[in-house]
């Protein structure tokens, strides 16, 4: 669980990110979840965009994805959302959260 300070720090980092995963009309499929999982293992912070063809709400999709991935919800704005999950491999941990 992230604190408000940690969430604010991650929101600042996420501003610079382009969406790495796109959710289309098929919504949150197993393939999309696998892609998110792989990206989070490599980068820890993930920005996702929901395409116009999808009927998902960003906050609902973010909460479902976070639950399925074991990640923390950071933010949802419009059709985009951000998730954070600490990398399993200590060598790939690049984000140091404030206390």
Image (cartoon, rainbow, N blue to C red):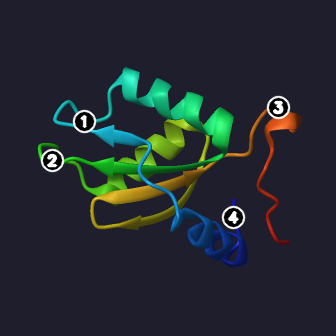
Q: Residues within 10 Å of mark 1 (few under 14, many from 20)?
A: some
In this view, 22 is above or below 1: above
Which label number is shown at residue 12?
none
In this view, 77 is above or below 73: below
Which label number is shown at residue 55?
2
Identity of the residue drawn at 51% across and 68% down: 15
| Residue carrying label 4 | 2
Which label number is shown at residue 27?
1
Which quarter of the rendered picture does the N terminus lie within? bottom right
- Residue 98's spot in the image, x, y percent? 82, 71
Q: Is residue 54 left or right of residue 76?
A: left
Q: Is residue 24 left or right of residue 49?
A: left
Nearest to viewer (mark 4 / mark 3): 3
Which quarter of the rendered picture does the C terminus lie within? bottom right
- Give the SS element for disc 4: loop
**Mark 1 and mark 3 in contact (Cβ < 8 Å)?**
no
**Mark 1 and mark 2 in contact (Cβ < 8 Å)?**
yes
């Amino acid at each position: 669980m992230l604190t408000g300070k940690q969430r604010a720090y991650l929101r600042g980092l996420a501003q610079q990110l382009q969406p790495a995963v796109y959710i289309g009309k098929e919504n949150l499929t197993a393939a999309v979840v696998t892609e998110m999982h792989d990206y989070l293992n490599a980068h820890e912070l993930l920005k996702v965009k929901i395409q116009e063809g999808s009927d998902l709400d960003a906050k609902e999709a973010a909460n479902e994805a976070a639950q399925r991935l074991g990640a923390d919800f950071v933010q949802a704005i419009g059709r985009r959302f951000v998730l954070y999950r600490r990398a399993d491999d200590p060598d790939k941990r690049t984000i140091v959260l404030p206390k």
